[in-house]
Image (cartoon, rainbow, N blue to C red):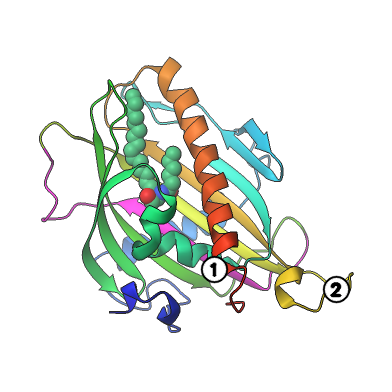
């Protein structure tokens, strides 16, 4: 089972969504195309809907207020740039089930319910309870893809390669609602692009000349009413914590390994 083998992740991941066929192929393909059209665009190009809500070093987080049926569902878009890791390494560590609990501190229970193909799984996870609110769980498809023909980037440079992880809520017969637990729904994408900088110092180590541009978008519907005064600051803190913890995790984990493009 190559899902559990970090080093042997399939080299044959589909480069174009829809190449492999499973019952969610079409939906996945549509969402990936939408992320490549819209999510990848830097905030500011679509009528300035996004408002900068936090900045930490090279990481910028943007949000916009969205309330659906009285529930706060503010989407988030974060952009980041990290050194010495490739797009593949970042996406691989975000997608790989085996390492989830090494960086995702809010997850209590985690199960792969179904493997749809070598790069696509359906996951059930429950989250640590944030007292006094009800516990939350979610059920989502997660797919990792190499993108062969990405749209031109706003920075004017051509990326060496582009990878994406696309997560979105689905239904599954093995994960009926759990009594007392509120089901959250999610739409998340992590889009990463590797850039190779020209050597301007004496280091000839490849890793020293790699940077990875990251776009992370998330729309989470917490599935039940939560007071805005609590939820908005809570989410902002949690997203920042995730981006910080996860990117440092990938840098630490890869620093002594051969570069994986
Ligand atoms: O993208 C992130 N993690 C991925 C792997 O876990 C996956 C994430 C899904 C997040 C699901 C969160 C659902 C529950 C949230 C409910 C919060 C409600 C609290 C109510 C308080 C009144 O894509 C990183 C996710 C970072 C999230 C902040």
The residue that mark 2 highlights is 199
Residue 106 in percent (x, y) is at 36, 41
> Relative to residue 139, is residue 51 drawn left or right?
right
* In-image side of 122 versus 44 (left or right): left
Q: Which residue occupies the foreground of this view, 28 or 197?
A: 197
> Can residue 75 be seen from the camera position used here?
no
Work out whether mark 2 precedes mark 1 in sequence or the reverse, and give the earlier one.
1
Q: Are marks 2 and 1 in contact (CB under 8 Å)?
A: no
Q: Is residue 13 above or below residue 97?
A: below
| Image quadrant containing the C terminus | bottom right
33 relative to 155 in the view: left or right: left
Number of marks in the rendered image: 2
Q: Quadrant of residue 27?
A: bottom left
Label 2 CA crowd tier, 10 Å (few <14, some 14–19, many 20+):
few
Instruction: Give the percent coordinates (x, y) of residue 93.
Output: 47, 63
Q: Which residue carries the number 1 mark?
A: 89
Q: Quadrant of the N terminus?
A: bottom left
Residue 157 lies in the magenta-colored region = yes
Residue 44 vertical position relative to residue 256 in the rendered view, above or below: above
Image location of residue 43, percent across then percent down: 65, 42
User: Which span of residues is magenta-colored?
Assistant: 156-178
Residue sitting nearer the eye, 181 or 99: 99
SS type, badge 2: loop
């Amino acid at each position: 089972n190559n899902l559990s083998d970090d080093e042997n992740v399939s080299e044959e991941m589909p480069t174009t969504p829809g190449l492999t066929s499973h019952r969610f192929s079409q939906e996945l393909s549509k969402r990936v195309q939408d992320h490549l059209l819209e999510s990848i665009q830097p905030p500011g190009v679509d009528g300035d809907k996004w408002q900068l809500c936090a900045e930490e070093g090279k990481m910028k987080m943007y949000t916009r207020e969205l309330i659906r049926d009285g529930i706060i569902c503010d989407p988030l878009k974060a952009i980041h740039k990290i050194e010495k890791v490739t797009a593949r390494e970042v996406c691989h560590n975000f997608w790989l089930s085996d390492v989830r609990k090494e960086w995702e501190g809010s997850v209590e229970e985690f199960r792969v319910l179904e493997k749809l193909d070598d790069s696509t799984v359906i996951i059930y996870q429950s989250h640590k309870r944030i007292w006094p609110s009800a516990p939350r769980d979610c059920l989502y498809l997660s797919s990792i893809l190499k993108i062969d023909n990405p749209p031109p980037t706003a920075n004017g440079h051509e990326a060496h390669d582009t990878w994406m992880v696309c997560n979105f809520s689905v239904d599954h017969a093995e994960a009926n609602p759990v009594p007392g637990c509120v089901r959250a729904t999610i739409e998340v994408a992590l889009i990463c692009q590797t850039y190779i900088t020209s050597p301007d110092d004496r280091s000839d180590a490849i890793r020293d000349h790699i940077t990875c541009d990251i776009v992370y978008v998330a729309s989470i519907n917490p599935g039940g009413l939560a007071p805005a005064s609590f939820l908005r600051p809570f989410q902002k803190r949690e997203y920042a914590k995730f981006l910080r913890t996860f990117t440092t995790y990938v840098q630490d984990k890869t620093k002594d390994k051969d570069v994986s493009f």
